Image (spheres, grey):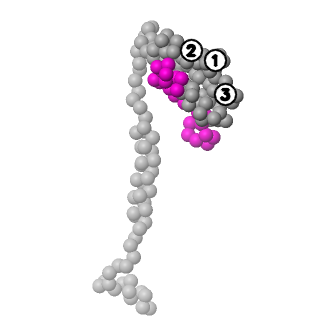
Amino acid sequence: MLSDRRRTDPGRPLAEINVVPLVDVVLVLLIIFMITAPLMLRGIDIDLPKSSVNTIKPEDRVVVTVARDRAVYLDKERVARVMLDGRLSKLAREKPGVTLYLRADRDVPYGAVVEVMDAVKRAGIDRLGMVTQPVAGSEGSP
């Protein structure tokens, strides 16, 4: 038996590497990281004191909507395009730190949306956000 002599020959180097201990160590490390990773993302637990006075002012938010028929609404009130500049200027004077959110139907031409954005900037409102619908299956969607 030639193969038995090769295994027992002390001068011949071992050609096979035993990977079982390596796999065992890797699996143990994987389990350790899987257990400790969620614990590292946790915040610091504190017990906040109670206050009867709210020191943070709520943010003024106004929504401008451009409907499919190109009608413009300021919050839920329909506003004619010729009156929009005046209403937005009045809003900017009354609430200097106002945040304006622009909602537009997806079928509204881009030019109509840009016209409303221009009116907002002309009125001196710097904080303008666009409202979108989350894509189904994306993170954070129900």
Query: Dots 1 and 2: beta carbons under 8 Å?
Result: yes
Few, some or many residues within 10 Å of mark 2 (<14, 14–19, 20+)? some
Q: Secondary structure at mark 2?
A: helix
Q: Residue tagged by mark 2? A: 87
Q: Secondary structure at mark 1?
A: strand
Res 70 label: 3
Few, some or many residues within 10 Å of mark 1 (<14, 14–19, 20+)? some
Pick the front one: 117 or 77: 117
Q: Is residue 79 above or below residue 10?
A: above
Q: Residue tagged by mark 1? A: 79
Which corner quadrant of the image does residue 13 belong to? bottom left
Residue 73 painted magenta? no
Instruction: Name which residue lies at 39% across and 29% down.
Output: 44
Seen in the image, is 68 located left or right of residue 29? right
Q: Residue furthest right?
A: 69
Seen in the image, is 38 located left or right of residue 132? left
Instruction: Name which residue lies at 59% across and 33% down.
Output: 111
